[in-house]
Image: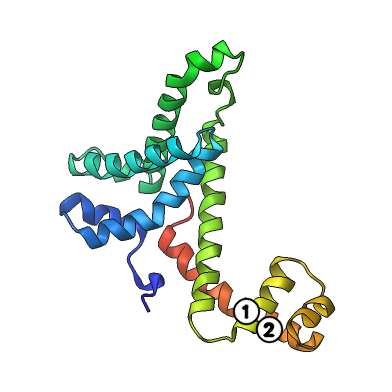
Amino acid sequence: MHDPTRTPTTTALLESLFHREDPEVWEQYDQRLRPILIRTARRMGLGATDAGDVAQEALIRAVSAGREGQYDRSKGRLQSWILAILRNLTVDCLRSMEFDNRARGDSRLAQIPSETETNEIWREEVRRKIHAEALRLLRMSGEFKENTVRAFERLALDGVPARQVGAELGMDSNAVYVAKHRCMARLSKRIEELTELYELIV
């Protein structure tokens, strides 16, 4: 099983694409960032189709501009730069809809989050993806039985009382708490590893 925690950082993936065509690197770059870009664009006001289009264009533009030498590392992190590209594309997309919106007495442009708010949305979406990926890796690792992972999810993530979780899964309350402790320790490690890859700070 491929372990994404052993792949290069997002910055390393993107900088690699600045210098050469590499379908495998592009696939990793796309899989890592596209879902975050789509969710960020949707929270900025785009529908699903437009958000998908804008996310794809942002990924392409980031690589193209980097190959043309337009990225200056001294002016900020690569992910900040990609987010700026996404924000500009999203604003352009919303602006193109503005005439119809005004005709309905609505203005999506007026509702666009500020740059600071957009940065926070990005951070939240990166965290969301990291936590989901960490949980997926935990489940796929085979280190824990499915019942153990499910007990952890129900108790720690869903907030269901241990007694109820135990009744659902055929475990006593003590076993449920043990499952939570064991999975939490491993999940925290995975989250730490993935955070380094995704370079969370914008």
In the rendered structure, find residue 186 and report the number of the disc placed on it: none
- Left or right: 175 in relation to 4: right
Q: Nearer the viewer, residue 152 or 120?
A: 152
Question: Which amino acid lies under the numbered mark 2 shown in the image of this protein?
Answer: Ala
Asked whether residue 12 is in view, the answer is no
Where is residue 107 drawn, in percent x and y? Answer: 57, 19
Where is residue 48 drawn, in percent x and y? Answer: 49, 40
Residue 193, above or below 119: below
Q: Which of 202 and 23 is in front in this view?
A: 23
- Kind of element beneath mark 2: helix
Question: Which amino acid lies under the numbered mark 1 shown in the image of this protein?
Answer: Val
- Left or right: 188 in relation to 7: right
Number of marks in picture:
2
Indicate how the structure is coloured in the image: rainbow
In contact (CB < 8 Å): disc 1 and disc 2 = yes
Q: Which residue is under mark 2?
A: 179
Where is residue 75 drawn, in percent x and y? Answer: 35, 40
Q: Which residue is under mark 1?
A: 149
Pointer 1 local density, CA inside 10 Å: few below 14, some 14–19, many at least 20 = many
Q: Distance between the residues labelled 1 and 2?
A: 7 Å
Residue 125, above or below 115: below
Q: Mark 1 or 2 closer to N-term?
A: 1
- Kind of element beneath mark 1: helix
Q: Which residue is drawn at 53% across and 35% down?
A: 44
Q: Which residue is drawn at 54% across and 32% down?
A: 45
Residue 145, above or below 150: below
Q: Which residue is drawn at 19% across and 58% down?
A: 22
- Left or right: 63 in relation to 89: left
Where is residue 102 drawn, in percent x and y? Answer: 55, 13
Q: Residue at x 51, y 62 (%)?
A: 130
